[in-house]
Amino acid sequence: MLLSSSIMFIDSHCHIHFPDLAKRMPEVLEHMKQSQVSHALCVSISLNDIPRVLALAEKYPFIYAAVGVHPGRKDTPEPTVEKLVSLAKHPKVVAIGETGLDYFHVKGEREWQHERFRVHIRAARACGKPIIIHAREAADDVIRIMQEEGAGTDKGGPGGVMHCFNETMPIAKAAMAMGFYISFAGVVTFGNAKELQRVARSIPLEKMLIETDSPYLTPNPHRGKTNEPAYVALVGEYLAKLKGIPVAKLASQTSSNFFTLFGIPEPEAA
Ligand SMILES: [Zn+2]
Ligand SMILES: [Zn+2]
């Protein structure tokens, strides 16, 4: 598809610091440019990878960073509220995450996941930065803990985003009631994602973000290949078609949502 030059997409969640993407960074960035992807938020998943995430954000003005420890990582250094708050002072860090609960990757004892999630929410409340939430087969507990800890703007929390959303409309509504945005990744483009597509159609554009979660979850028609931020354009084009609106409208509103949520000054339209 040939896009108008004014259209710009933003990848609100990627892991370009992972070796597969980091080792061919010039190409990854060139592809972003070709696909009209103007910014990307690089999200850490452990304390160990935060230096690499920050290095990318320091090097490239259009890359931002989030600091957190993924709920699917069991044997990794545990973050404290103080540690996360101090990491979040970095000028390119715009969010705490990714955090949340993952009962798919980690079976058994759940108490440590809950505690780690609470630590992230407390840190986000302390520094006022939005939370990037990962929920896999754990949506009810995620919403409960968000409410208990006051993650939402309804309880003076910073709000944030439900990343790679793959849940039902009631869960989306509960999150939006707490001031959270709903972010869609390549999963929504898959042929078997009919229910999720129905949900996406009902989410107001004003509450929607788009992402790749690269190197995972490559959208159609590239499913099976390594994902990268450039492909967020495919997610955006797909959602525009699904909602029956112009691609330019979806791109500009989701980009504007990104700047609003993460407190980044919106660049002047060229
Ligand atoms: Zn995730
Ligand atoms: Zn992720």
Image (cartoon, rainbow, N blue to C red):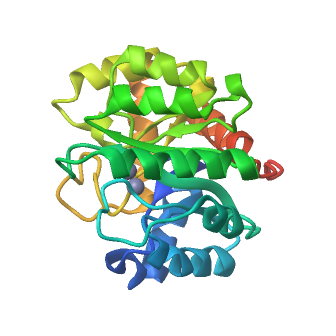
Rendering quarter of residue 226: bottom left
Q: Nearer the viewer, residue 80 or 87?
A: 80
Q: Is residue 176 left or right of residue 259?
A: left
| Residue 106 location (% of width, % of height) | 21, 52
Can I make out residue 211 in this image? Answer: no
Q: Is residue 44 above or below residue 27?
A: above
Q: Is residue 124 left or right of residue 195?
A: right
| Residue 10 location (% of width, % of height) | 57, 51
Q: Residue at x 36, y 49 (%)?
A: 113
Can I make out residue 256 in this image? Answer: yes
| Residue 185 location (% of width, % of height) | 38, 43
Q: Nearer the viewer, residue 19 or 119?
A: 119
Disc tally is: 0
Q: Nearer the viewer, residue 223 or 136?
A: 136
Q: Residue at x 47, y 43 (%)?
A: 133
Q: Quadrant of the N terminus?
A: top left
Q: Nearer the viewer, residue 138 or 111?
A: 111
Q: Is residue 216 above or below residue 139?
A: below
Q: Residue at x 40, y 58 (%)?
A: 70
Q: Residue at x 36, y 43 (%)?
A: 101
Q: Is residue 64 above or below residue 263?
A: below
Rendering quarter of residue 14: bottom left
Q: Which residue in the rendered view is the most extreme toward the bottom?
A: 23
